Amino acid sequence: MPRLLSISLLLLICFHPFFGQGQQLKVDSLLYDYTILETALKENHPLIVDHISKERFAFVSDSLKTEIAKGQNIHQFYRSLSCLLTEVGCGHTRVYPYEEAKRKAITESQLPFSIRVKDTSIFISDPYHPDYASFDGKEITAINGMPAAELIRSAYRIISADGKNVTYKRRSLEKKFYYYANLLLDLPDKLDLTVDDSIHLSIACPSKFRMPDSLIKKASFTEREDLKGIVMLTLPDFDEGRRTIKKCFAYLDKKKTGTLVIDLRFNGGGNGNIGALLLSYLIDSTHTYYLDKKTKPFPYKEYMKGGSGLILSNQYIQTDSVTKSYYFRIRPRSRHHFKGEVRVLVNGGTFSTAAFVASVLKYKTKAVISGEESGGSEYAIGGGVIARLELPYSQLSVKFPLYRWRFNTAQDNKGCGVMPDPDPLFQIKSE
């Protein structure tokens, strides 16, 4: 799907008749909230001109402002803000829903099966509840009367991604399908799924379903029994896994393993220090990366409720007291350093710190990347400290980064993720 949609299509998707049947809110108050966000993005977002021109941003923003001035309910206003944020091209820039949505959609409630999105179609996959086993592989053609293709297009307009990336939007929709379906359908009491154009499934909202713990991946490594000499290191995130990484490389060294496969599929990121730890076992020379910060005073400071995240690492040096840029160094480890063949599995769910790791391995080592384009940028992402802006009237929260995390790998910012290498002898499905 092209990144720069015509504004008429953008507005059609944001304000489709399927949406927004609730109570209208005060226009002046909504416009005030919108101005706070628009100004904060223009003045303080570190990636604001990386993927969109000032002219395009102003055009989209003014067009959305015109729609808001006609009157909107909370559902429509949420989508207006989301449509603006998706234009920035930063997957870490997101609007978080209103209180009703938090109660109904941001819960542990899920569907009793996984979802796979292919082009403009939606399929049921891997049911984990026995009552739904017979639906594996069947197509969902509509939800609450909304055609599947319409729901996908609408979801892509409210899911922020790095640059021009679409694989991240697809994988995010798959992973959080229940959540996005609720938001796009204005928090219904149930989801009525039309399957194969004839079967109807009804699932209450919030649902009673929870994915079993046994199906949730954890950091691990194992030697493939069917492929001797190959160890698979699986890292579902970089929030955990420090001990697993250390044990894995000690094992590789002891066994003199020839090939390491690192599975970063659906790794949404996490602690940059753990990513740096992994890289230290694999790089042959010191790698330097950067955090760049915009330095303009933050407008509407009274609506900032603090930030989260760290700019700390094992070593950082402030290089310029005016720009407040920092650089970080990852030095190769001598103990248990791995010199064998490295394969890295990525997909659209490979994001943030995981994309950084994949980018360094692709450009600074001889590692081979397999799968599909990563969800996170290969060049730079928003990172460091994540600001939280609370809009006073709508009570919506917007989080966005205050730093550009520049990887110092790819030479040019093409607006894409880490691309897989041609590797016909070693293809593993990205699913």
Image: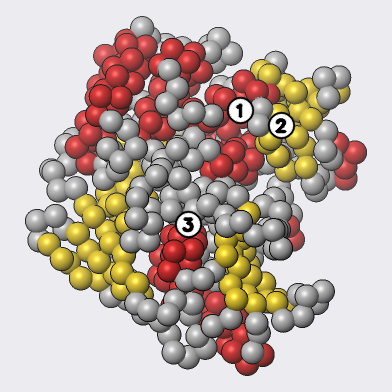
Q: Are marks 3 and 2 in contact (CB under 8 Å)?
A: no
Q: Are marks 1 and 2 in contact (CB under 8 Å)?
A: yes
Q: Is residue 374 above or below residue 158?
A: below
Which SS class for mark 2? strand
Q: What colouring style does the render use?
A: secondary structure
Residue sitting nearer the eye, 360 or 89: 360
**In the rendered structure, which amino acid carries the disc numbered 1?**
Ile
Q: Nearer the viewer, mark 3 or mark 2?
A: 3
Q: Which mark is residue 263?
A: none
Q: Nearer the viewer, mark 1 or mark 3?
A: 3
Q: Is residue 60 above or below residue 423?
A: above
Question: In the figure, is residue 22 to the left or right of 395?
Answer: right
Task: Confirm whether residue 189 shows in the render.
Answer: no
Question: In the figure, is residue 29 to the left or right of 335?
Answer: left
- Residue placed at 21% from the left, 52% from the top? 293
Residue corresponding to mark 2? 122
Residue sitting nearer the eye, 20 or 4: 4
Residue sitting nearer the eye, 339 or 424: 424
Distance in Å between CA atoms under marks 1 and 2:
8 Å
Q: Position of residue 153 (x, y in %)?
A: 57, 25
**In the rendered structure, which amino acid carries the disc numbered 2?**
Ile
Residue corresponding to mark 1? 152
Task: Confirm whether residue 252 shows in the render.
Answer: yes
Which SS class for mark 3? helix
Q: Quadrant of residue 191?
A: top right
Which SS class for mark 1? helix
Residue corresponding to mark 3? 355
Distance in Å between CA atoms under marks 3 and 2:
26 Å
Circle 2 residues within 10 Å: few <14, some 14–19, many ≥20: many
